[in-house]
Image (spheres, rainbow, N blue to C red):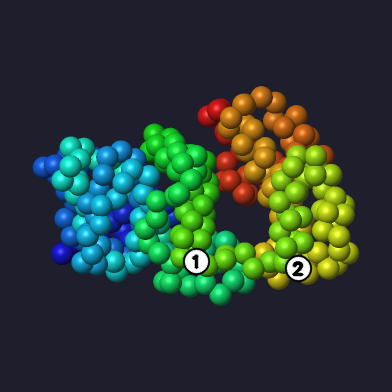
Amino acid sequence: MIHLPVGSALRGKERYHCHLSVFTREESFPLHDHEFYEFFLVLEGRLKHICNGETVICETGTICFLRPGDAHELHCAPDSPRTKILNCNVLGDEVQRLFLHVTSDCPVALEDCVQRILPPQAPLRQALLEEAASLSLAENDGLKTARLRMLLENILLLLIRGSGFDANPAPDWLRTARQAMHEPANYRAGLRRFVELSGRTQEHLCRAMRRYYAESPQEWLTALRLDAVFDRLMLQGGDISAAAFDAGFHNLSWFRRAFRKRYAVSPKEVRKRS
């Protein structure tokens, strides 16, 4: 069996390394294990995946998640002439950090989660496939790392929910208020609106956010607004200042610093790739 150390897949300061793999009936990836985490999405065809001695056939759209030490091999399924997957290797501390972020205080262990899932909703499955296909063609830079991080967060949430766990034990009033804050008119209004929607005092809201989500209301609102600007610049391009103001930012210098800190690229670099 082949053993792959971290340095064989992730070089220098890399936290993610992804690539396309295409298999025909005559090709395969032999039995191996590795010292890092790995996930892959089946983009086309059907894949025969043998992991820790168990053989499964993975349909298009299937997501598989591998832990350090898992031994697996990959082949085309017998009835599939060609199979394409997006494979991504991830540093261990990156996975652990993201897992803690998405589970917050919920007592869930990564080892207790399923390692394979086919998202049941067709629109979600298609969105993940399109993002994975796009990432396979993207340049290897800070923006790609940010997108891979967001993809991995979504995958971890799918695995947690597919395991029967509730990754969000927060009370209904807080979950409802957070969901309502995704409306542009609400996140533009800021913390005052969040407090109104919660029906609690600002101090109560702050304590609950820190307890269940490990961040303050303002930190979460800033991330929500930054994500809105990121998506707008990626999809539409346009004026950066206008996008920032529309999201509720009034200090452009602070906005640019916060944007770079979150995504490791400037707003201008994101707009160039729109």
Question: In the rendered image, is residue 145 in sight?
Answer: no
Q: Identify the element where label 2 is drawn.
A: helix
Q: Residue drawn 15% across and 46% down?
A: 78
**Quarter of the image holding residue 250?**
top right
Is residue 272 left or right of 56 when viewed as pictured?
Answer: right
Q: Residue 217's quadrant in the figure? A: bottom right
Amino acid type, residue under disc 1 in the picture:
Gly
> Along the line of sight, which residue is nearer the eye, 80 or 102?
80
- In the rendered structure, the answer to whether residue 93 lies left or right of residue 23 reads right
Count of numbered tags: 2
Question: Who's the residue at 56% across and 75% down the image?
Answer: 107
Residue 163: % across, % down: 46, 65
At x 37%, y 62%, the residue is 115
Residue where numbered disc 1 is placed? 164
- Determine the CA span between mark 1 and mark 2: 24 Å
Residue type, label 2: Ala
Residue 261 place in picture, x, y as percent: 63, 49
> As rendered, which of 3 and 112 lies closer to the eye?
112
- Disc 1 crowd rating (10 Å Cα; few below 14, some 14-19, many 20+) is few
Q: In which quarter of the image is residue 256?
A: top right
Q: In this view, does 230 lie to the left or right of 85?
A: right
Task: First in sequence, mark 1 or 2: give its number.
Answer: 1
Q: In this view of the protein, which residue sits in the foreground, 249 or 208?
A: 208
In the rendered image, residue 20, in percent from the top left (x then y), is placed at 31, 41
The residue pinned by badge 2 equals 208
Q: Picture coordinates of residue 257 (x, y %)?
A: 69, 45
Quarter of the rendering occupied by the N terminus:
bottom left
- The answer to whether residue 154 shows anywhere in this view is yes
